[in-house]
Image (cartoon, grey):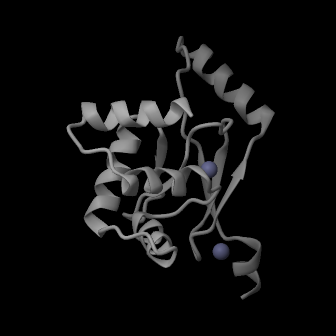
Amino acid sequence: MEKIQELQEIFLKEGLRYTKQRETIWQEINSSTEHRDAEDIYFTLKTRGVATSRATVYRTIEVLVRNNLVRALNIGDGRYRYENKLDQTHHDHLVCTECGKIIEFLNENVEQQQEQVARDHGFTLVRHIHQLFGVCEECQKN
Ligand SMILES: [Zn+2]
Ligand SMILES: [Zn+2]
């Protein structure tokens, strides 16, 4: 598990103690495919019986995001959603404005079009954030 060592180095660099709780917070995010806010992650850990404080969870997530281990999504409602960034291939998101559901998608045409747009303007694309907002199937029924 060389990832654990990397994690230890990151916390050291950030001047934070490397604890079992912090490792568990990372594993909780890394083993999930969900897009959750810090509060959801905190409550999941609590339900699992992990003894940690809200402050530790928030602080740890912040460090993980800053060090590119976790991705933070801003979907415009003031609450960041977090997702596993390692071992995840690139994808974009569809966001339901009613229930907050997030669906991942990857569309080759969209990807190529974005590359083309960048080239047309003399840009070399480094990364992109592409989010589509709408109302999901279930919410349309209600
Ligand atoms: Zn919905
Ligand atoms: Zn995602």
**Residue at (31%, 38%) from the top-left corner?**
11
The one nearer the camera, 102 or 7, is 7
Residue 30, x across and y down, in percent: 56, 49
Res. 140 visible in picture? yes
**Residue at (43%, 59%) from the top-left corner?**
76
- Which quadrant would residue 89 be assigned to in this image? top right
**Residue at (52%, 63%) from the top-left corner?**
36
The one nearer the camera, 91 or 118, is 91
Residue 92, x across and y down, in percent: 65, 45
Left or right: residue 119 versus residue 45 is right
Res. 74 visible in picture? no
Indicate the quadrant containing the C terminus: top left, top right, bottom left or bottom right.
Answer: bottom right
Indicate the quadrant containing the N terminus: top left, top right, bottom left or bottom right.
Answer: top right
Rendered view: 36 above or below 107: below
Rendered view: 10 above or below 139: above
Left or right: residue 64 versus residue 53 is right
Rendered view: 50 above or below 140: above
Residue 26, x across and y down, in percent: 47, 50
